[in-house]
Image (cartoon, rainbow, N blue to C red):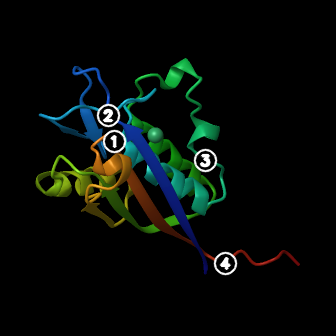
Amino acid sequence: MDIRVGQGFDIHPFSEDDSRPLILAGVRIDGVPGLRGHSDADAVAHALTDALLGAADLGDIGTHFPDTDDRWKGADSMRLLAAAVQLVHDAGWDIANTDITVVLEAPKLAPHRIAMKASLEAVVGAPTSVKAKRGEGLGAIGRREGIACFAVCLLTRPQQLPEV
Ligand code: MG
């Protein structure tokens, strides 16, 4: 069996536009500012999309969904994640699991973790862990200027024997 690990990272600043909702892993979190970005700025979906594409050596999110392309303006990033899952499957890979760490000072993610996990698992089709970590007051994250996310995934594929 072939196995591949992938990692992805993303970071977005909070938006000054109060009307922008905060969307993480496709889950809307009310009562806090949204993130600035060309799409819906879902840093969790973006980091996991990059992890999956990276594991399969299929480029990155910018290759497939460039932010200069108006088709992706305000896009639902869970659709981009679903498209990446399809690309990975098309290359013969199964997704074994994914693991997410969201780094943010606020809001508290604990009340949303189960919804975020379910939302990601529905698209990825594999066990997915969602964890949150505070910035402990350090740097831009600690100053509550934005939210970062780290993602890893594992892919498996039956070993492809050389043709004889
Ligand atoms: Mg992003």
Q: Which residue is mark 3?
A: 60
Asked if residue 134 lies left or right of residue 75, the reply is: left
Q: Residue 8 at what x, y percent from top left?
A: 50, 56
For the residue carrying disc 4, how many other residues have a C-alpha within 10 Å: few (<14), some (14-19), or many (20+)?
few
**Pointer 2 and pointer 1: residues touching (CB < 8 Å)?**
yes
Q: CA distance from mark 3 to mark 1?
A: 22 Å
Q: CA distance from mark 3 to mark 2?
A: 23 Å
Q: Nearer the viewer, residue 82 or 116?
A: 116
Q: CA distance from mark 4 to mark 3?
A: 24 Å
Residue in the picture at 38% in, 35% down: 41
**Pointer 2 and pointer 4: residues touching (CB < 8 Å)?**
no
Q: Which residue is mark 2?
A: 14
Q: In the displayed structure, would residue 45 be above or below residue 34?
A: below
Q: Residue furthest right?
A: 164
The earlier-in-sequence mark between 2 and 4 is 2
The earlier-in-sequence mark between 4 and 1 is 1
Q: CA distance from mark 2 to mark 4?
A: 44 Å
Q: Nearer the viewer, mark 4 or mark 1?
A: 1
Element type at mark 4: loop
Q: Nearer the viewer, mark 4 or mark 3?
A: 3
The amino acid sitting under disc 3 is Asp
The earlier-in-sequence mark between 4 and 3 is 3
Q: Which of the 4 image quarters holds residue 96?
A: bottom left
Q: Which residue is mark 1?
A: 146
The amino acid sitting under disc 4 is Gln
Q: Which residue is mark 4?
A: 159
Q: CA distance from mark 4 to mark 1?
A: 42 Å
Point out the image quarter for the C terminus: bottom right
Asked if disc 4 is less than 8 Å from ligand 1, the answer is no
Q: Residue 25 at what x, y percent from top left?
A: 31, 46
The earlier-in-sequence mark between 3 and 2 is 2
The amino acid sitting under disc 1 is Gly
